[in-house]
Image (spheres, grey):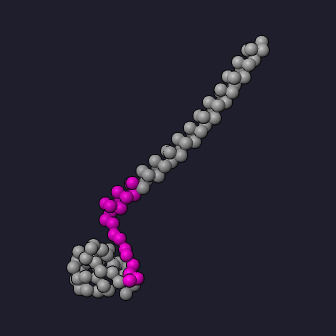
Amino acid sequence: DVMAKIFSGTGMDADRNVEDNGKLGSKAGLYGGPDTVRQHGDILATYRSTGQMEISLVEQRKAKKLEALRRDLAVKAKLAEDARSAFLDEEQQLRSFKKQA
């Protein structure tokens, strides 16, 4: 049964308490814990509760924002370095004009 393999270890079949498709009969084993026996080729599915999913999504958003901030900082640092270099060049040129005058 394909659906049994897809939902194997997700808790969606927790009401079944018999050995089926290589799973142990204990309900703890149906959640993909250490008691679960899997046959070669079975699909390993994971299940996250709503709270776990929300936490994961919040962490992903934070990571994306942090990466965007790092990119912005790198761009601004490069622009600041370019401006500093241009300023030093102009200052050097001004000094040379003063010496000529």
Residue at 35%, 78% (x, y): give it.
7
- Judged left or right of residue 74, residue 52 is left
Residue at 35%, 83% (x, y): give it.
39
Image-quadrant location for residue 89: top right
Pick the residue in front: 76 or 85: 85
Pick the residue in front: 88 or 64: 88
- Judged left or right of residue 7, residue 66 is right
In which quadrant of the rendered image does the C terminus lie?
top right
Pick the residue in front: 79 or 37: 37
Residue at 49%, 49% (x, y): give it.
67
Q: Does residue 95 sit above or below 49 in this rendering?
A: above
In which quadrant of the rendered image does the N terminus lie?
bottom left
Q: Residue furthest top?
A: 101
Residue interval drawn in magenta: 40-59
Residue 43 falls within the magenta-colored stretch = yes
Q: Does residue 95 sit above or below 81 in this rendering?
A: above
- Judged left or right of residue 54, residue 85 is right
